[in-house]
């Protein structure tokens, strides 16, 4: 039972949260004030709990709706299969998902107590995103497209940064657009193997609503904007020169861009893997550059 519940959190996917919080921490180190390692650890724990909670509730919803029985499972899409193998654990997983959300709310309340009510709007937006993602957002194509990026981009980066520093800055918002576009693309590409199943259960994302051509064009626009923004931020000194380490990820992004021209064909697992590597590596490379500055 315990192993089944752990699998529903999708542990491999939680690496993304580590990469995004690392970016927020690296941005915070650019301030002269010393950072609290204990506070940074609590920020990471809260972010991981939020991500895990979304994963668990999504697994429960897909198990109860029958979606996971229809999907072609890959390492990056189609669910973990844990609740299909052990259906008796569904209720326990649902409870765990709710407990994780309560834990996240409690941590958020502590952060608001620590830093003030300025954090409340971001916290409420994040909680609303978590609660509404599976039952509501996945049925609205354009909202479904940008919701993942909002969660892991502006909300997570700016929220973490504010907790660590006690302030918001325009530069942090602009930098948060990099994970915004990356994570939107991560979820968009992962929807391709599940498209037929999503249609059958009534999910409406960009792919199922408008087809592979629109999804492919959107993917390439988002990917291009990611590097345009990185270059622009370096030119206008939103990011310091060492953050140019982020361009190393082009060795992954360029073949991914070329392959995304023909997304109407069955996607090889290698393509999904490249997208995951890019989404995690680019924030980490920028973080490394910030720490080297």
Image (cartoon, rainbow, N blue to C red):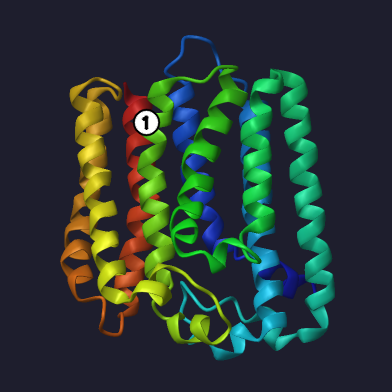
List x then y, in percent, for residue 225.
Answer: 25, 46
Looking at the image, residue 143 sits to the left or right of residue 263; the answer is right
Identify the image quadrant of the N terminus: bottom right
List x then y, in percent, for residue 90.
Answer: 79, 77
Task: Please tell me which residue is depicted at 82% across the width and 84% down the height of the picture.
Answer: 88
134 vs 265: above or below: above
112 vs 245: above or below: above
Helix, strand or loop under label 1 = helix
Q: Is residue 41 visible?
A: no
**Picture quadrant where residue 81 is located:** bottom right
Q: Residues within 10 Å of mark 1 (few under 14, many from 20)?
A: some
Task: Please tell me which residue is depicted at 68% across the width and 86% down the height of the picture.
Answer: 84
**Picture quadrant where residue 52 is located:** bottom right
Task: Please tell me which residue is depicted at 70% across the width and 65% down the height of the picture.
Answer: 57
45 vs 252: above or below: above
Q: Nearer the viewer, residue 164 or 60?
A: 60
Looking at the image, residue 88 sits to the left or right of residue 278; the answer is right
217 vs 147: above or below: below
Identify the image quadrant of the C terminus: top left
List x then y, in percent, for residue 50.
Answer: 66, 50
Q: Is residue 16 visible?
A: yes
Q: Which residue is mark 1?
A: 174
Residue farthest along the top direction in this orientation: 32
Q: Nearer the viewer, residue 210 or 224?
A: 210
Task: Please tell me which residue is depicted at 25% across the width and 36% down the height of the picture.
Answer: 230
List x then y, in percent, for residue 220.
Answer: 23, 59
Looking at the image, residue 99 sits to the left or right of residue 241; the answer is right
Count the numbered circles shown: 1
């Amino acid at each position: 039972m315990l192993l089944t519940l752990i699998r529903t959190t999708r542990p491999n996917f939680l690496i993304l949260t580590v990469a995004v919080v690392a970016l927020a921490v690296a941005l915070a180190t650019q301030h002269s004030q010393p950072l609290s390692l204990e506070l940074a650890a609590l920020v990471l724990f809260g972010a991981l709990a939020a991500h895990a909670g979304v994963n668990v509730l999504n697994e429960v919803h897909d198990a109860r709706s029958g979606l996971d029985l229809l999907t072609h499972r890959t390492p990056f899409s189609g669910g973990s299969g844990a609740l299909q193998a052990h259906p008796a654990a569904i209720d326990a997983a649902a409870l765990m998902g709710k407990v994780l959300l309560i834990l996240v709310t409690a941590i958020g309340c502590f952060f608001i107590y620590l830093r003030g009510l300025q954090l409340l709007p971001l916290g409420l937006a994040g909680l609303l995103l978590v609660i509404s993602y599976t039952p509501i957002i996945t049925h609205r194509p354009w909202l479904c497209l940008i919701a993942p990026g909002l969660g892991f981009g502006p909300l997570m980066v700016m929220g973490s940064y504010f907790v660590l520093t006690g302030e918001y800055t325009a530069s942090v918002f602009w930098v948060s657009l990099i994970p915004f576009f990356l994570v939107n693309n991560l979820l968009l590409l992962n929807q391709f193997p599940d498209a037929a199943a999503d249609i059958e259960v009534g999910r409406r994302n960009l792919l199922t609503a408008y087809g592979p051509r629109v999804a492919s064009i959107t993917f390439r626009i988002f990917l291009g904007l990611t590097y345009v923004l990185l270059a622009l931020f370096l030119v206008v000194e939103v990011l310091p020169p060492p953050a140019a380490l982020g361009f190393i990820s082009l060795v992954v992004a360029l073949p991914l861009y070329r392959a995304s021209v023909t997304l109407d064909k069955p996607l090889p697992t290698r393509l999904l893997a490249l997208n995951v590597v890019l989404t995690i590596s680019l924030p980490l490379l920028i973080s490394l550059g910030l720490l080297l500055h």
